[in-house]
Amino acid sequence: MNKSELKVISVLERVGGFASAQQLHQLLLRSGESIGLTSVYRALQSLLDDKIVDQLRKEDGEAIYRLCGEAHHHHLVCKSCGSTVEIEGSALEKWAKAMAEEHGYREVGHLAEVFGICPSC
Amino acid sequence: MNKSELKVISVLERVGGFASAQQLHQLLLRSGESIGLTSVYRALQSLLDDKIVDQLRKEDGEAIYRLCGEAHHHHLVCKSCGSTVEIEGSALEKWAKAMAEEHGYREVGHLAEVFGICPSC
DNA sequence: GCAGAAATGAAAATGATTTTCATTTCCGGG
DNA sequence: CCCGGAAATGAAAATCATTTTCATTTCTGC
Ligand SMILES: [Zn+2]
Ligand SMILES: [Zn+2]
Ligand SMILES: [Zn+2]
Ligand SMILES: [Zn+2]
């Protein structure tokens, strides 16, 4: 855990939700920290590998991050209000892996989202 | 509905699932069509506006598209050549349903694709 | 204090997507 | 047919987030 990672974690705590790498960089600069954009990206990548942050994509494809100490997971997204809930995905992981193996595919990844209308909507 | 849009629709039909703009362009060229990448992007944007295609984002942020309104199914997609295999999804269906119920979500749907590199690539 | 490792950040490279702009194709009125 | 404007097309340039490169700085253990 190096300086950049600590700075990024601290600004993510301050933000409290999702933010892009560029936004986090701006926020850090504005709050007087000295850090390069490269280091923000590196820190985020490292925090992502360590499962300390969670990455999503905006509709335009830009990555956004938030603190989230959970393992790889998927989301249940409300079609109405957009709120997201993390869901347990081991059944899905197994399915994706099994399907890929069955057909001899390598370097496998997957993508899955469940949509619905949340109880409060 | 112009020529480019027709070409893009036809290749999307052939693909049967999700594909990126770049993949669609390559597939069109390989199948002998003459079309520019710009026109593929333009056609996809227009089809998106008209709700004729759906857009998703891969984990790396690249946009992928598919024809709307196809019978529900899932695919194993080759990241390299774009070829797709239809896969059995009952385990996934169960998982999505269970997750939604567990959190009290209504009107549930889901999206899932598995990506990898096929044996012949 | 010192060498080697890790961290840092500026600048260049990358890659998808969008924009610009000149050219070509369409199409309806004359 | 023929013309002129509108729509379509695509090559090249621009954009923009992200990654890579690489030279410099900071750490760390001895
Ligand atoms: Zn809601
Ligand atoms: Zn997963
Ligand atoms: Zn392949
Ligand atoms: Zn399904």
Image (cartoon, coloured by chain):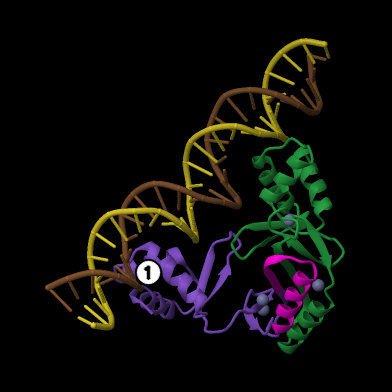
Chain colours: A purple, B green, C brown, D yellow
Relative height, residue D11 to residue A35 (above, below): above
Q: Which residue is under mark 1? A: A27
Mark 1 residue crowding within 10 angstroms, few (<14) / some (14–19) / many (20+): some
Image quarter where the N terminus of chain A lies is: bottom left
Which of these two is toward me, A49 or B54? A49
Q: Which amino acid type is shown beneath numbered disc 1?
A: Leu
The residue depicted at 76 percent of the width and 71 percent of the height is A101
Q: Quadrant of residue B117?
A: bottom right
* Ligand 2 sits in quadrant: bottom right
Q: Residue furthest right?
A: B71
* Residue A18 seen in this snapshot: no
Question: Vertical placement of A119 versus A33: above or below?
Answer: below
Q: Chain of mark 1?
A: A
Q: Which residues are magenta?
A: A90-113
- Ligand 1 under 8 Å from disc 1 Cβ: no
Q: Is residue C18 left or right of residue A41?
A: right
Q: For residue B89, say whether it is visible.
A: yes
